[in-house]
Structure formats: C-alpha cells, structure tokens
C-alpha cells in the first residue's frame, strides 16, 4: 500500500472516470498530485490483480461495488441497486464502455445558464482529445452480433436513419453502431488505463488506493487546506492548497456535507458545524429513467447468436438509436438499445430498452450519518415530475421499441415483458411505476452555476462558491444531464476542469 504523503500541491479525491483525467493532466504539467481512491489500485493494464469481470467488456462488471441502493425510498420490496465501482478508474471499470457525446444543445444549454467556457464549440476539441486518449472506436457492421444487426437494419423503416455513429453534436435521430473504449481481445479500456498508466512513472504523481476521504479541511482564511483521509483504520490529515473532488454524483456531495458545506439545517441535524450554507449540495440529483422490454426470441436468432459466440466475440450491447418523444422538436430525447445478455436467465434472453434522456424529475443525496463508510440516503424520486412528462417520454420510447420489434418478429418473437396486453397508457404507467429503472447516469448534485443561482454549488471553474481551493470535477458538476450516456461527458469535465486549473497557474 502506498504510504500517504503529508502534503501535496493538489489532492484529487476519487481516482474514477474524471479523477483519473484531472490527476493525469495535473501531474503531467508538473503539479505534485496525490490521488486518494477509496477502492484499491490494482495497477496498470496487464497487472493480474485486476478482477477479470472489470476487464471483460462484453458485459457490465460487478466486483468492486460500493453497495448503494434506494433504501426504503421506493416503499416496500427489494431496494433498487445503484451500482458504483469502488476501484481506481471508478465506474469506467464496470460500465458498458459506450462513449456518447450528446447534442450541441446540451452544452450550449450549460453555458447559457451562466457557465462560460462550456459551450459545444468550446468543448468539441476536448471530446476529440478524450476519444483519442480512450482509444474509442466504432463497431464496424461486420462486428455486430445478429441480434444487434437486426435492430440496426430495422431502423430506417421506423424513421431512424442509419448513421455512422451517434456522436455528431449536430445530428438528430438515427441508429448507429456504438462507439466504445474496447481494446485488444475485448478489454474495457478504463480511465485509469487510458489516463493514469502513461503517467504512473512520473514523480509528480502519487496514487493511494484504499484511502477513503472523510472531509475537506478548511483553514482559518476560509480556503480549503487539505483533507482528512482514512487508510487501514487510521485517519491522516494531508495538506494541499488545491482539493479536487471527483467522487461522483453520489459521493462528492457526501464529502462536502461531512466537511460542513451544504444545507445548514441538514448539517446541524447531524451535529456537523456549518462552514458554508450551500442549499444545492446533494440536491438536483437526476438520472435518465429506463424501461426494458423482454422478448421471447426465436430458434433462428438463438442459433445465429450461438454461432457468433463460437466465433469469439459477442457483447451484450452494440447498437444505439437516438429517437424523439412527443416533447422533442430540435434533436432527440430517447435512447433505444437492443440487449442480449446470457446471465439474467438460463441461456439467452432478448431485450430492447428505452431511456428518457432529458428527465424532469429531481431527487437528492443526503447523509444519514457522519461516518464516511455509512451509505448515504439516495432518493432519485424517479417519475415524480409534476407534469408526468418522464412517464410520457418512456411510453413514447416503448412504442418505438414495439414498432421495431414488430418488424423484427422473425427474430424477436413475441413480447414477454411487460407483455402484449399492457398497451393502455394507464397500464403502461402502472408497469413503469411498479419497478422504476435507471440508465445508470446520476448527475447534478453539486451543479455549476453563477453565485446568483441559489442552488448552484460551484462556479464554471468547478470551484465551490465561498470555498476557494476546493473544486468539483465529475458527474456532480452537471447542471443537467446531456442527451447522452455520461462517461464521455464526465471525461470531458475532467479535461475541462484540469485545463482551467492549469491555465490559472500560468
Ligand atoms: C453499471 C453502469 C454502466 C454504465 N454504462 C455506461 C456506458 O456504457 N456509457 C456511458 O457513457 N456511461 C455509462 N455509465 C455511467 C458512467 O460510467 C458514469 O457516469 C461515470 O463513469 C461517472 O464518472 P465520475 O467520475 O463522476 O464517477 P466515478 O467514475 O464513479 O468515480 C468516482 C470515484 O471516486 C471514488 N470515491 C468516492 N468517494 C470517495 C471518497 N470519499 N474518498 C476517496 N475516493 C472516493 C470512487 O471509488 C470512484 O473511484 C454506467 C454506469 C454504471 C454504474
């Protein structure tokens, strides 16, 4: 285990998807950088300590999970799991490895909220740079499995033109093979491999695994002066003039709250001294709700997929469609994707899902205890928007999936879930509400915005309002989720915040 230094020029809290980017860019520029990661550092790509499931890009990994769930926020029944990877590389180590950019409107929208430097034109070079660093490639059509290829081929008849990829910032609806950070023999090329491996040898970089940050330390001058971190049961204080929080949408607000930065009433209720009354910390939690349909499949598709597996490489997902619900006039607000896992049931199972990319519902993350190992309260309040638009968007997505499936009856077979009888709006809504599901993209719990916005937590440089020396660089920073899966936008946030830190240092 790496011994902890007593000081650094910059501390990066969380060596995840964005944290790896920030640390790599700062260390490469000569800034003495310490990464404190709550999970292990299994080493560079090729080190046998990496769990196999975190390397295998065919399906999601699970080995190093934080164990978060919905607790009792959804009422009775099994809580909903909120998977988050606790290991160097964060969620980039277990995710679907799909890299999507979203649409120009998303980032221009962030900028229009009072965040200079975040427009699509300003971020476009960072999307390019991150794609190169992550070795992103788009599946050639010949690499699609038969299940994926069938859905891709069905797109045009359902009004979804075939695109080269889904990442044109000016492009609207369409269907395309996924762009992925998958290298070699199906290895998920996570952020730690892409960003940290090339700089591991620098003496400006220290990576400490199994180091759980409790809180940010605040000096008498009101600025961040370092962190308190627990490793092997011992708590250490490490000094640094710059602390960059990269713990992700669930954990970054919890570090802030334990530091006394957040809604004053909540802090006092837990006996935490209020350092900054910032009502937005932990608020604005949102994710893209999701509906997964299941089909019976046919002997024909099962045989074709068996042949694909025998040939070697058959990932669970490879194709995405961008589509528009009744609410979208300018771009797209739905992702549809076919999915063919073998682990959910005994043998093949046949699915296609729809996700509402621009959710209206908002929830929150709160502390239940001051203990940094305690699970926070995560209440997404899925499908709770007063206009019920999230449900309507999902119903439109389901209708499109059904239209595609009907034209694919020779491979999809009949619908099993929710089933052909569940068609009336009320019945579909009841099905959606019985088991809300998410697309794994929580964001927004330390959102950026001008100080005049009472719920803004950070400014456009990621610096916490009223707490100089402490910045946020992860999914928590997003004012609202882009029309995208979030790994690439989060990577770009890492690039953007690192660039602004370095620009200010001159
Ligand atoms: C199952 C799953 C599948 C997904 N699939 C896709 C996909 O295919 N495509 C896509 O674009 N997006 C996908 N996503 C979403 C995407 O991976 C995330 O949005 C993104 O990785 C989040 O990055 P982050 O840097 O904000 O947080 P993370 O990557 O989660 O990094 C946070 C890091 O901080 C560490 N940490 C937290 N608290 C502390 C603390 N107190 N002290 C020290 N360290 C701490 C964590 O252990 C972690 O390493 C998926 C997510 C999941 C969960």
Image (cartoon, rainbow, N blue to C red):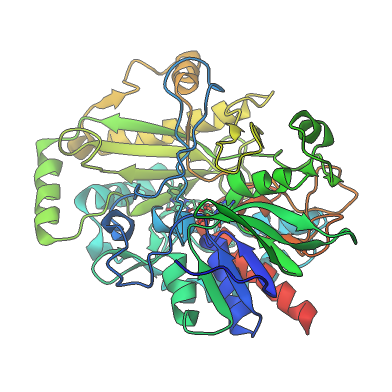
Q: Nearer the viewer, residue 154 or 239?
A: 239
Going by the picture, which residue comes out furthest to the front? 234
Give the left or right position of residue 288, taking residue 237 as reference: left
The reply to whether residue 493 is in sight is no
Residue 28 lies, with reference to residue 157, above or below; the image says: below
Q: Going 34% across and 38% down the picture, which residue do you hit?
A: 352
Q: Going 64% across and 33% down the picture, which residue do you hit?
A: 369
Q: Specify the quadrant of the image occupied by residue 345.
A: top left
Give the left or right position of residue 23, taking residue 316 as reference: right
**Relative image position of residue 79 (x, y in whole percent):** 46, 25
The reply to whether residue 378 is in sight is yes
The number of callouts visible is 0
Q: Quadrant of the N terminus?
A: bottom left
**Relative image position of residue 45 (x, y in whole percent):** 34, 72
Q: Nearer the viewer, residue 46 or 114?
A: 46
Give the left or right position of residue 41, taking residue 466 as reference: left
Q: Nearer the viewer, residue 200 or 450?
A: 200
Q: Quadrant of the C terminus?
A: bottom right
Q: Going 10% across and 49% down the picture, which residue do you hit?
A: 306
**Relative image position of residue 177 (x, y in whole percent):** 36, 59
**Relative image position of residue 155 (x, y in whole percent):** 36, 48
Q: Going 48% across and 62% down the picture, which residue do you hit?
A: 209
């Amino acid at each position: 285990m790496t011994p902890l230094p007593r000081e650094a020029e910059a501390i990066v809290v969380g060596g995840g998807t964005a944290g790896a980017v920030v640390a790599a860019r700062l260390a490469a520029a000569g800034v003495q950088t310490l990464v404190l990661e709550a999970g292990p550092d299994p080493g560079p790509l090729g080190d046998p300590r990496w769990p196999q499931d975190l390397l295998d890009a065919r399906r999601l990994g699970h080995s190093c999970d934080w164990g978060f769930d919905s607790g009792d926020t959804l009422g009775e029944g099994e809580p909903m799991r909120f998977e988050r990877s606790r290991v160097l590389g964060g969620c980039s180590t277990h995710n679907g490895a799909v890299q999507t950019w979203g649409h120009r409107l998303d980032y221009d929208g962030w900028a229009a909220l009072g965040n200079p430097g975040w427009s699509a034109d300003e971020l476009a070079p960072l999307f390019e740079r991150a794609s190169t660093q992550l070795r992103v490639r788009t599946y050639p059509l010949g690499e699609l499995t038969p299940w994926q290829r069938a859905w891709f081929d069905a797109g045009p008849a359902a009004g979804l033109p075939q695109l080269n990829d889904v990442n044109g910032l000016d492009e609207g609806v369409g269907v395309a093979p996924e762009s992925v950070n998958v290298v070699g023999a199906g290895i998920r090329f996570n952020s730690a491999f892409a960003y940290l491996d090339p700089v591991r040898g620098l003496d400006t970089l220290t990576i400490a695994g199994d180091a759980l940050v409790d809180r940010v330390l605040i000096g008498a001058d009101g600025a961040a002066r370092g962190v308190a971190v627990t490793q092997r049961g011992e708590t250490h204080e490490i000094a640094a003039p710059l602390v960059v929080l990269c713990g992700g949408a669930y954990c970054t607000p919890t570090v802030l709250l334990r530091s006394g930065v957040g809604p004053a009433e909540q802090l006092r209720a837990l006996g935490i001294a209020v350092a900054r009354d910032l009502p937005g910390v932990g608020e604005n939690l949102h994710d893209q709700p999701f509906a997964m349909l299941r089909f019976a499949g046919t002997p024909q598709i099962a045989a074709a997929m068996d042949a694909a597996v025998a040939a070697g490489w058959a990932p669970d997902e490879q194709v995405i469609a961008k589509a528009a619900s009744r609410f979208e006039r300018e771009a797209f607000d739905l992702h549809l994707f076919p999915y063919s896992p073998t682990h959910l049931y005994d043998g093949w199972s046949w699915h296609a899902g729809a996700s509402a990319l621009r959710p209206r519902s908002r929830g929150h993350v709160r502390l239940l205890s001051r203990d940094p190992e305690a699970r926070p309260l995560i209440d997404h309040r899925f499908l709770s928007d007063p206009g019920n638009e999230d449900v309507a968007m999902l119903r439109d997505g389901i209708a499109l999936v059904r239209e595609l499936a009907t034209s694919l009856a020779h491979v999809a077979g009949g619908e099993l879930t929710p089933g052909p009888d569940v068609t009336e709006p009320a019945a579909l809504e009841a099905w959606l509400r019985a088991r809300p599901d998410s697309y794994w993209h929580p964001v927004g719990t330390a959102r950026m915005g001008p100080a005049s916005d009472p719920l803004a937590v950070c400014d456009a440089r990621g610096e916490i309002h009223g707490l100089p020396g402490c910045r946020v660089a992860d999914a928590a920073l997003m004012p609202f989720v882009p029309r995208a899966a979030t790994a690439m936008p989060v990577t770009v946030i890492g690039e953007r915040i690192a660039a602004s830190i370095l620009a200010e240092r001159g």
